[in-house]
Image (tube, helix red, strand yellow):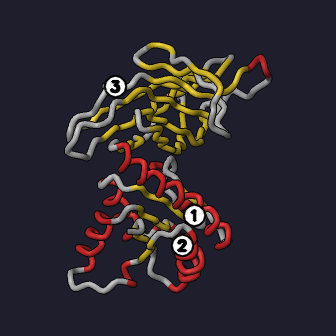
Amino acid sequence: MKPFVFVLMPFSEDFDDVYKLGIKAAAELCDVKAERLDEQMFIEGMIDRIYRQIEVADIIIADLSTRNANVFYELGYAHAKDKICILLTKNASDIPFDLKHRRHVVYGESISYLKDELVKNIEWASSEIKAQKENKIRIVSKTPIGELAVSDQSAECTITFTFDLFNDTNRISPEINALYLYAGNKWNLFQDGKTCAHTDSDIAPFKYRYFLSPPTPRIGKKAWSQVSCVGKRVLAEAWRGDEIKYTYTLGGRGILRLVVDSGNYDHHFDFNIEVTDFPF
């Protein structure tokens, strides 16, 4: 059966081309089934139908353009259900700050760009679903927490990355042999107060691979575990001629690789965070 993509977006003629030439076209290229509510036949109430479709969907695509209140509400429900969500918008300002760390596509007026980027994102989401089913462990990235320390000489940020590991099955999970965090920039990474070993990445375009200790060898039936790490990075140094600021925005993509006997499961995650230090 093809993966099912449920699409949340404003019901307006202004978005017909976005849906038909962008979203639907990308879905067909990825061999997944994409539908909006207005394409379906149903007898229950509209809200109940939306809830049910979100629950059965493998992937959610939500267009946040114009900040439609209904789309925001439905997306919140999808996040509460831990669904894989791909966010779209014509204008980056339509994505609220607390959603900017989520995977999103800013397509402006280019539907061809939207289609191309959606193909990449749908392929990623489909591989994520397949890996979850094969490895029996589902990984969810939590919103990172950031701090900034500023002096006359430097600005350094500290970001805490946290990942929830779920075993949704009625069997004990495969044994977790190792966890690796892949990053594009060099961080001083710590876990439980100890420095994480690192080496060059074996996945392009990431530059570094950090070793994390698994929180537990196996995850029990219908159980949950969690792994966290703290990354520190110098953003500016006066002796290099850098401007020392009191607010910085950091963003990027990373991979948390889970290694089990049957193979590797790569969980791709995005983050976008603003760190601020208030001078006295």
- Do we see residue 92 in this rendering? no
Which quarter of the image is occupied by the N terminus?
bottom left
Up-down: is 110 above or below 134? Answer: below
Closer to the camera in the image, 120 or 238: 120
Res 16 quadrant in image: bottom right
- Residue 227 point in image, percent of width and height: 38, 29
As measured in the structure, the alpha-carbon distance from the residue carrying label 2 to the one carrying label 3 is 39 Å
**241 sits to left or right of 145:** right
As measured in the structure, the alpha-carbon distance from the residue carrying label 1 to the one carrying label 3 is 34 Å
Residue for point 29% across, 63% down: 55
Q: List the residue tagged with mark 1.
A: 118
Say which amino acid is labelled 1. Leu
- Residue 11 point in image, percent of width and height: 44, 81
As measured in the structure, the alpha-carbon distance from the residue carrying label 1 to the one carrying label 2 is 7 Å
Say which amino acid is labelled 2. Ile
Q: Are marks 1 and 2 in contact (CB under 8 Å)?
A: yes
Up-down: is 251 above or below 146? Answer: below
- Residue 245 point in image, percent of width and height: 65, 30
Q: List the residue tagged with mark 2.
A: 23
Q: Earlier in the sequence, mark 1 or mark 3?
A: 1
Up-down: is 217 above or below 255? Answer: above
- Residue 104 point in image, percent of width and height: 54, 56
Residue that lies at the very extreme toward the front in this rendered image: 262
Residue for point 34% across, 83% down: 40
Say which amino acid is labelled 3. Pro
Crowding around mark 2 (Cα neighbors within 10 Å: few <14, some 14 to 19, many 20+) is many
Q: List the residue tagged with mark 3.
A: 215
